[in-house]
Amino acid sequence: MTQHDLKDRRAIVTGGAGGIGLACARELAARGAHVVVADLDAEAAQAAASEIGGEAWAVDLSDTRALDEISLDADILVNNAGIQRVAPIADFDPDTFRLIQRLMLESPFLLIRAVLPGMYARGWGRIVNISSAHGLRASPFKVAYVTAKHGLEGLSKVTALEGAEHGVTSNCVNPSYVRTALVQKQISDQARTHGIPESEVVEKIMLTETAVKRLVEPEEVASLVGWLVGDTAGMVTGASYTIDGGWTAR
């Protein structure tokens, strides 16, 4: 890592107050970027921003109508905010499905739309979309999440093609299960849906497809994001980088 290679760069990280987002915010700030921590939890966003010397943006990204005409000044955008719900399709709440599409697909589109004019004007920009192994593979009982992540993959590729002549790259990072609160909250839902004890969920559900039998650490995801937003990754665009312990090698 080059110390302060992101000096004078302005970054926005959504869902930046915890988990992968906070790890990314710390990584970019450590390398000199001014980081805007965007999160629904205003108090947590302010705490994270204070820790890294950035700024907080308390925002409900599921309210996509409010983002229709927004304009954002950023050199780097990390689309990370997300939630998860686990249920069979026949039992899946339609409003929850719509919520997940708004938060995890519509809002990244609108944020990309909001940052591109400034990136184009400067001739430089980096967009990283935190996708998932579920952006490349499907699992039962996760219809909304898998749908949104597959859509995010397409959005990222179109952005890459349009942004290329303007010095803007767009890529996806695709981790398997990461040690975050989001994953911890899934355990009871997974146990109930699959009819197994909570103590067996990590081994029998979350790690069954991976060759490396452990959860991904948030800092591992952030390290890849850090490389993708640097100058040495200028020829990397339209790609999907797995951090999945060999899941998608099958």
Image (cartoon, rainbow, N blue to C red):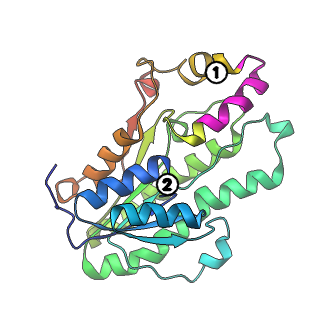
The secondary structure that dominates the magenta segment is: helix
Where on the picture, by quarter, is residue 174? top left
Task: Identify the residue shown where x is 59% and y is 76%.
Answer: 67
Who is closer to the viewer here, 53 or 62? 53
User: Is 171 within the magenta?
Assistant: no
Image check: 62 left or right of 208?
Answer: right
Image check: 73 left or right of 88?
Answer: left
Tell me which amino acid carries mark 1.
Val
Q: Which mark is residue 201?
A: 1
Span of residues in magenta: 184-197
In the image, residue 119 lies at what x, y percent? Answer: 33, 76
Nearer mark to the viewer, of 2 and 1: 1
Tell me which amino acid carries mark 2.
Asn
Check disc 2 and report the residue beneath it: 80
Who is closer to the viewer here, 201 or 143? 201
Is residue 232 visible in the rendered image? The answer is: yes
Pointers 2 and 1 in contact (CB under 8 A)?
A: no
